Amino acid sequence: MNELLQQIEAYKKEITDYKQDDAHAAETFRIKYLGTKGLVKAVMAEMKNVPNENKRALGQILNDFKIFTENKYEALKSNTGSPLQTTGNDMDLTLPGDTLPLGSRHPISIVKNKIISIFSRLGFAVAEGPEIEDDWHNFSALNLPENHPARDMQDTFYVSQNPDWMLRTHTSSVQVREMEKGNLPIRIICPGRVYRNETISARAHCFFHQVEGLYIAENVSFADLKQTLYFFVQEMFGQDVKVRFRPSYFPFTEPSAEMDISCLICGGEGCNICKHTGWVEILGCGMVYPNVLENCKIDSNKYSGFAFGMGIERITMLKYQIKDLRLFSENDARFLKQFTSAV
Ligand SMILES: [Zn+2]
């Protein structure tokens, strides 16, 4: 009996001195003292060996010992993670780590990737070309011979003249390069940066980004064009969006059209963004002019095709309600970090 009491006192001292030296200290303590094979259970088992007249007193002592041990366990548990509980090891593995800001994709890249992903599901491959172009690929092959008035629609940065080299004014030059390769049918989109000598404002810049598309095969019709673009805007802006086509003019397509979508802000009711018309212009398109096909050595009696082009800035401004085009190139982190969660 006395031996047992001495043993309990020794255990109590051991428990009092028990130090937390790592994050698992409380659990280690529990297994050692309070587990099914722990010391408290082992001491309790001694009960059966003491005489009956001592059982009541010993029961009280054992119960106190158990509570004493449990209290220590609770203290260890609640101290876990506290930087004040130091035992010569100052490292606290439970503190959150230093966060590394990952940055965000540029909104133009986000929308460009989305456009590529939508058209790739329709079988369109991505084609790219040089940003400095010669006159043939940027203008002449596209039914814009020298002195054609439509050249004035695109104020051009010339790198040199006679022979003329320029910063491309549209990515249609990539389409010409693809058509010249002669691998028919052609089903491509051409994303890229283009340049025009325009005054910088909230709605225009001297450089911007386009995605143009081209599909050339046998028996391609305007119906194919409409369905392709309808699918695109539904995927980009939602299933409820409506479209309309207005007749237009481009030198390289005939017939040509501008495509509008129903205003995303007012849903067609009329607001400032849509200038109270309920519609916003989104892209230009049309059937490829036979001359353009012939310029690129494609038999226009056998093949037909459609082409379309859109400004990525414009799509991005509509999608994210951005009102000033200049924000895209100012590198203002307050603007850019708003797209951290966009993918
Ligand atoms: Zn509106």
Image (cartoon, rainbow, N blue to C red):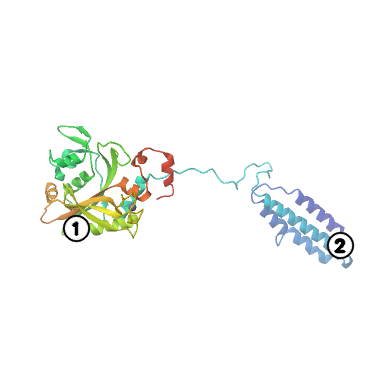
Residue situated in front as seen by the camera: 65 or 100: 100
15 displayed left or right of 57: left
244 displayed left or right of 324: left
Q: Ligand 1 within 8 A of label 1's CB?
A: no
* Numbered disc in front, either 1 or 2: 1
Query: Which kind of residue does numbered mark 1 sit on?
Result: Phe
**Image point 43% across, 43% down: which residue?**
337
Tag on residue 222?
1
291 displayed left or right of 167: left
- Residue 135 at x, y = what percent? 16, 38
**Image point 16% across, 45% down: which residue?**
142
Q: Which residue is mark 2?
A: 57
- Residue 253 at x, y = what percent? 17, 50
Q: Secondary structure at mark 1?
A: helix
**Image point 51% across, 44% down: which residue?**
99
Direction left: furthest residue: 301
305 displayed left or right of 32: left
Q: How many marks?
A: 2
Residue situated in front as seen by the camera: 44 or 310: 310
Label whose residue precedes the other's in the sequence (1 or 2): 2
